[in-house]
Amino acid sequence: MGSNLPIQPVIRLHLGHPRWNTTLKAVWLRMGMLLCSAHFCFGQALSDDLLDHGAKLEARQKAQGLTALIAAADRGHADVVKLLLDRGADVNARRTDGGATALIQAAGNGHTGAVKLLLDKGAGAVIDAKGLYGATALMPAAQNGHLDTVALLLAAGANQNETSDGGYTPFILAAQDGRDDVLDLLLGKQVNLDQQTEDGHTALMLAAQNGHAFATSILIERGAVTVQVLLA
């Protein structure tokens, strides 16, 4: 029969029990309970307790190489992100399955609060670090339409003209997915309207191809080339 006890008090009960075998506790903590707490947001207090009882701050999940900080940032648990940063977590640690940082994870999901915390703790020094497919934090933020996050990253110095694998810029990605507000913001920056991806697509081509009428009209209005001759 399953227990109806909430998980946080149960974990705290185990952590503090005097008869709990010390070796078992060490194994359990190494197995990533801190990472689980950060990922599922059992709460800042529980993560704090786990750290106090010896949980490894930089322990990694095997499949993707997540740290607790990357997991918390990915889910937007700003209170846990702050706790981990205050405890000395590596703000620029990278996933092992593509190199994404906590900043890239938070930005791609539009977690502006977590992004600000990460930038304040030093992530801005490598704001254009690249993860999977050569994407910077600004790229998934723009592609997913997270306007506030895009604005914050630009204010912190993110390069709006950086290219991913395949030659996609944040501007091209925003146009491709019809993110009109983001597109309008980026048009106020120094972007090349007619920059091409490696396979020859421009922002206008992709906006039109995907049926984004408003994005298409904005780009034409701003002077994007409507007839492009592609060289083989």
Image (cartoon, grey):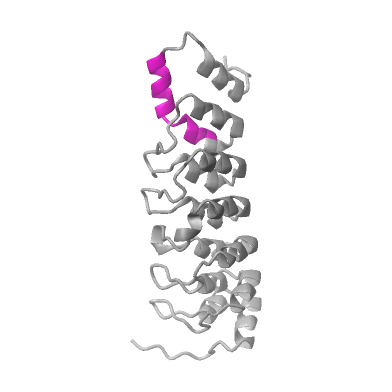
Q: Is residue 10 above or below residue 65?
A: above
Q: Position of residue 133 (x, y in %)?
A: 39, 62
Nearest the eye: 178 or 46: 46
Q: Main secondary structure of the magenta part?
A: helix
At 66% from the left edge and 77% from the top edge, which residue is drawn? 214
Which image quarter holds the C terminus?
A: bottom left
Nearest the eye: 58 or 32: 58
At 55% from the left edge and 61% from the top edge, which residue is drawn? 141
Nearest the eye: 232 or 165: 165
Q: Is residue 19 above or below residue 7?
A: above
Q: Position of residue 206 (x, y in %)?
A: 52, 76
Q: Position of residue 54 (x, y in %)?
A: 45, 26
Left-right relation of 27 to 161: left
Q: Quadrant of residue 23?
A: top left
The answer to whether residue 43 is visible is: no
Nearest the eye: 60 or 88: 88
Q: Quadrant of residue 9?
A: top right
The answer to whether residue 169 is visible is: yes
